[in-house]
Image (spheres, rainbow, N blue to C red):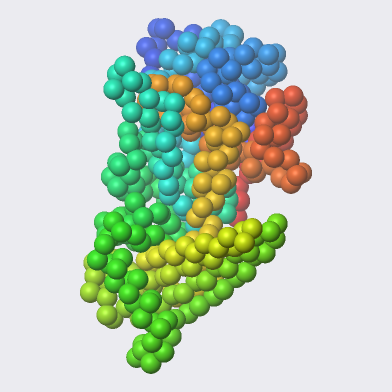
């Protein structure tokens, strides 16, 4: 990908400004902002400072008819751009980055941007629901809501915007809903949904089944498919045991969960410094009862926390962003995720952290081109 290719990506994006007041080209402002965020900018002032420092270089591929825009101009533009249409521009780029979705795990989870509240207006912090292609390390889509409690309605709306054919969608218990399962299947994908007490009857029935299946060896049913892994190191011992079955004839609610094939129990036993803990999680899935594969997918789901949410907070300082305008905050969040996807793709030196790559981009224009060049299509 080149800077000129970035400009082309926004050709169809409607410019929200009145034509007679435009001094700066929309594509110039957007591309400068993306490059600035990759290079370490965390807000409107940072974007402009970086642009002014790199103005001569930027003019080699951007028109910049009125020079570098002011921070207020950048802010007004991002607070006026339609978030859905802006996201669609990025989605086209992400399709190039992510390639085929066949057998890819798409993890969906929410994150609250804590400093975006406005107490004087009674405005709660912005909550962002994101779809994350775990193996590729790219965001597939996002949707902003006013509260975590709105995830049940936000997830179906987000699914409507995504190309998911052939993928496996994983969601925590908040998204374990019959209508969400149906929508995932209708999109041509499979699901792995965490099952907790928000589905109380089904949850208790699944707990009871696994307890009975393990204790009663004379149970007239298929044996459980089990896979166990042991991780040991740095004074920690963890045993993960995945048990699953497609013996669901007994399950009264089976028909109400579209294409449900398998129920899963995952036990995690940890021992650290002589202290032991045990956690048990349950799942519903359209997958065949392959305990090893399901265990890997369930574990990979949490990359959305470790490789996206954590990095956005620690490297891009997202949790400290005080941009209160909903539209501006949503669009800037999209820039951060796109920047992260591009930085992750540059893998010439696996030892470099995302933070170090951002610093290197800020120092070295050639390295910035290298990061963009790494964003070619993936098979």
| Residue 151 figure quarter | top left
Q: Residue 50 at x, y = what percent? A: 64, 17
Q: Residue 130 at x, y = what percent? A: 44, 43
The one of 339 and 242 positioned closer to us in this rendering: 242
The one of 9 and 120 positioned closer to us in this rendering: 120
In the picture, measured across the screen, residue 60 lies left or right of residue 156, that is: right
Q: Residue at x 28, y 81 (%)?
A: 249
The one of 15 and 295 positioned closer to us in this rendering: 295
In the picture, measured across the screen, residue 311 lies left or right of residue 263, that is: right
Q: Residue at x 49, y 36 (%)?
A: 90
Q: Residue 313 at x, y = what percent? A: 54, 34
Q: Residue at x 47, y 45 (%)?
A: 140
Establish if 375 lies above or below 219.
above
Q: Residue 91 at x, y = what percent? A: 47, 40
In the picture, measured across the screen, residue 367 lies left or right of residue 318, that is: right
Residue 192 shows up from this direction: yes
Q: Quadrant of the N terminus?
A: top right
Marks counted in the figure total: 0
Considering every residue shown, the one lying at the far front of the view is 274
| Residue 34 figure quarter | top right
Q: Quadrant of the C terminus?
A: bottom right
Residue 104 shows up from this direction: no
Establish if 249 lies above or below 305.
below
Establish if 116 lies above or below 267.
above
Q: Residue at x 49, y 25 (%)?
A: 321
């Amino acid at each position: 990908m080149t800077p000129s290719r970035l400009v082309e990506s926004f050709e169809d994006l409607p410019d929200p400004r009145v034509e007679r007041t435009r001094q700066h080209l929309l594509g110039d402002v957007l591309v400068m902002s993306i490059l600035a965020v990759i290079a370490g900018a965390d807000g409107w002032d940072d974007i402009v400072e970086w642009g002014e420092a790199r103005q001569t270089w930027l003019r080699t591929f951007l028109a910049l008819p009125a020079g570098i825009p002011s921070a207020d101009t950048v802010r007004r533009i991002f607070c006026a751009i339609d978030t859905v249409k802006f996201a669609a521009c990025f989605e086209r780029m992400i399709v190039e980055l992510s390639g085929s979705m066949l057998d890819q795990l798409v993890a969906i989870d929410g994150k609250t941007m804590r400093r975006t509240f406005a107490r004087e207006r009674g405005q709660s912090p912005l909550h962002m629901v994101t779809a994350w292609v775990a193996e590729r390390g790219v965001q597939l889509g996002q949707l902003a809501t006013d509260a975590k409690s709105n995830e049940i309605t936000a997830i179906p709306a987000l699914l409507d915007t995504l190309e998911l054919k052939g993928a496996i969608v994983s969601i925590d218990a908040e998204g374990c809903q019959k209508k969400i399962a149906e929508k995932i299947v209708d999109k041509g994908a499979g699901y792995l949904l965490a099952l907790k007490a928000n589905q109380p009857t089904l949850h208790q029935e699944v707990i009871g089944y696994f307890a009975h299946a393990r204790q009663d060896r004379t149970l007239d049913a298929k044996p459980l498919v089990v896979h166990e892994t042991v991780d040991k190191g740095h004074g920690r011992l963890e045993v993960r045991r995945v048990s699953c079955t497609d013996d669901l004839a007994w399950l009264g609610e089976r028909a109400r969960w579209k294409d449900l094939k398998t129920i899963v129990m995952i036990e995690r036993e940890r021992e650290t410094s002589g202290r032991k803990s045990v956690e048990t999680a349950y799942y519903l899935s359209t997958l065949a009862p392959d305990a090893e594969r399901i265990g890997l997918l369930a574990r990979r789901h949490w990359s959305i926390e470790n490789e996206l949410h954590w990095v956005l907070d620690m490297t891009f300082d997202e949790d400290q962003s005080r941009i209160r305008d909903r539209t501006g905050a949503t669009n800037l969040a999209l820039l951060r995720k796109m920047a992260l996807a591009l930085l992750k793709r540059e893998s010439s030196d696996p030892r470099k952290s995302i933070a170090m790559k951002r610093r290197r981009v800020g120092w070295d224009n050639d390295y910035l081109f290298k990061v963009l060049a790494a964003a070619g299509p993936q098979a």
